[in-house]
Image (cartoon, rainbow, N blue to C red):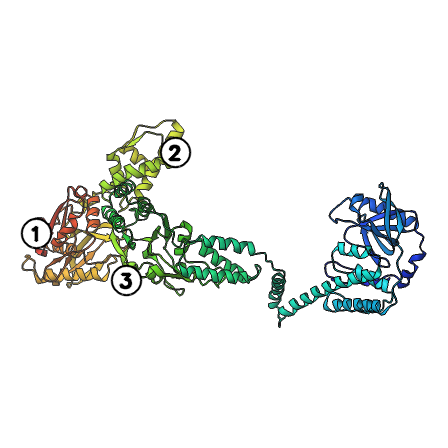
Amino acid sequence: MSIEKMLLRSEDDMDFLPIIPLNESDQDDTNGIEVPPEIALLPLRNTVLFPGVVLPITVGRDKSIKAVNDAYKGDKLIGVVAQKDSNVEDPMIKDLENIGTIAKIVKQIKMPDGGTTIIIQGKSRFTIDSIVGEDPYFKAKISRIEEEESPKDADFDAYVANIKDLATEIIQLSPNIPTEASIILKNIENPSFLIHFVSSNLNTDIKEKQRLLELNHIRERADLLMQLLQKELQFAELKNKVTTKTRTELDKQQREYFLQQQLKSIKEELGGDSNVQEIKEMQKKAEAKKWPQAAKDLFKKGIEKLERMHPSTPDYSVVYNHLDLMLDLPWQEYTEDHYDLKKAKKTLDSDHYGMQKIKERILEYLAVLKLKGDMKSPILCFVGPPGIGKTSLGRSIANAIGRKYVRLSFGGLHDESEIRGHRKTYIGAMPGRILQSIRKVKSSNPVMILDEVDKLGSDFRGDPSSALLEVLDPEQNHTFYDNYLEAEYDLSKVLFIATANNIQNIQPALRDRLEIIDLSGYAVEEKMEIAKRHLVPKQKEMHGLKSSNFRINDKVLEKIIQDYTRESGVRELDRQLASIMRYQAKQLAMKGKLKPSVTADDIEKILGKSKYSNEIYKTANMAGVAVGLAWTYVGGDILFIETSLSDGKGELKLTGNLGNVMKESASTALTYLHSNANRYSLDSKLFEKKNIHIHVPEGAVPKDGPSAGVTMMSAIASALTGKKVKPFLAMTGEITLRGQVLPVGGIKEKVLAAKRAGLKEIILCWQNEKDVEEIESDFIKGIKFHYVKTMNQVLELALVGY
């Protein structure tokens, strides 16, 4: 009994494990048992019991438990038959095999879960004559099948020896079967029991075992058993071959790889794999894909690699994701452009007020496309102050020409891999943002906005602005190389539009590739139109006032723009309008009605006292003070130049956070006046006895550039002569020691800043007249321009009573 317990079958980890009889001599006693005329039947699902063999059986069905209990109380004999279909839970008579084995219940064990485990030993085969009862369990009349004597000839002895040899080989090839099994097998002397014993433990189909049981002639049974053993041996050899094939010098890291390779080898031999469906779907998509030959070849190579890999290997997901990207990219898929220029112009005009230069450029591009049919897309760069609609204009352009729109924000980007992608071997690698965006919009010719391109950073991880050189060069971007994709991608049909506030911050090589279009700030008139057409309706809708009919008239809008904002764009104006809408929403919620219009008094009540005032230019009118015009990245601005004289040794002192160029302009202005003192009726001794202090207010703000030269000279001349600078007069221009006035940039922004501040006259270099003519005349109505060539002309115009 101890040997039997040691060798009981565990289906999870045993391949071929013999079940040993309590006593082999019991096989000889089978003829001595008394078979009752009627016997209880025990259907077995997954096994066949052979005469002489001992089996442990767990009995779970109620019928079977009753049959076992009754038999154990009586003569301990029970008829064991196999089910034809092991999936049938409650078998009927038709589900039972006709031939079974009379078994003796050797031991009955009650389990804690209510089940019963019995150890039974097969005694003799029988055939069912008739079923005499079905309740509470099957009872049948049976006829015993007599076993024929084992032949004594050499031929049969060879059969037996061969069966032993085959079974021993299987045991040796199966590492999960203990070596004691082959010793026990050799010691079995009874040929009939040997056949039954090996048949019982054969790893084959239940129907084959039933065939073995049903064969009456022992020689036929031995012949069939040998055939089945040959199959079993071939399978064991195959398993051994797979194991040997994948066996290598393993360490802890290779253990997982070894198991995966084993699984792969088994699947190769079986001819099936779990990722076949995935690969078929990919190949089906690839067949319908329009892409260049190089991409097709790369995909084919990747698919072949994927077919050789098992889904659980780490590299499988890397290769799969790479192929998935290739399938998702719209290689030669383009949206159709709308060539209706009138409709495109109407779309652009309805979305944005003004910006004629950009609109003309887009319409020119469309016109060439319409005539030629194909053209490399221009690389445009909109440069201008914040809040004037550079980014939103990109979406409007996409709508006008019927293309997809995508935006990439480059503000603070400092990793080159964000543009070109990571090598796919890295964990978490992904393509660059250019290809990600194209994958997202499913088109190879979208309008792509590269927002804030002047704010790209660079550090030890690389310089993204250098990586952009390839993207934004029309001669190179048809073969853009992404590190993740590992193939060239054509970006030549993409309409790239970069936006920037300060062109000086863009790398020179990158700036050279861009077609710069300057966008200046809005005049008051433009802001009023934008507010009426876009901002007020938008804010009404956002605050639930769309159905309310209150109005904000032009005078009120002008007051909001001039008294509460000082900007080139309209973002601050939008915020002030939002404040008004919130107030109106509160009034409507509390009182249930609104006044028909918003008045100037309402504005002061809602927004408070005016934040900005033009009165400062009246009160600041004293000798030594002049008004200059400056350009900043947020648009134009005005600044005061204050000059004061004090007793001293003729020193020049400069304050107000001035840059080197501005300091040099002050020195140039002073030297010019000193050298021309007699011409301007100045006492030359003043320059030796008086210290001159020049200050530019808002000392926390850095200031630089040559354009304040004429303003500084006018301020110094005013202080030295005691004559005031004309009120409401501004000036801008660079000066030379010869007394020349040179042109400066940013004229439109500066002029609009002067207009916003309420100034009436502006002095400019004569060469800047062309810049003023580009500004719409309605926006500068009321401003008088003086164009000068020399500093003498400046002083004649600027100083009162000169």
Residue drawn at 38 percent across, 54 percent down: 332
| x, y percent for residue 66 | 85, 45
- Residue that mark 1 sits on: 796
Q: Give the CA separation, mark 3 to mark 2.
A: 48 Å
SS category of the residue bearing label 1: helix
Q: Give the CA separation, mark 1 to mark 3.
A: 42 Å
| x, y percent for residue 44 | 80, 50
Q: Earlier in the sequence, mark 2 or mark 1?
A: 2
Q: Nearer the viewer, mark 2 or mark 1?
A: 2
- Residue that mark 3 sits on: 508
* Amino acid at circle 1: Glu
Indicate whether 638 appears above or below 480: above
Q: Give the CA separation, mark 2 to mark 1.
A: 58 Å
Please identify the quadrant where the N terminus is shown.
bottom right
All told, the count of numbered labels is 3
- Residue that mark 2 sits on: 544
* Amino acid at circle 2: Gly
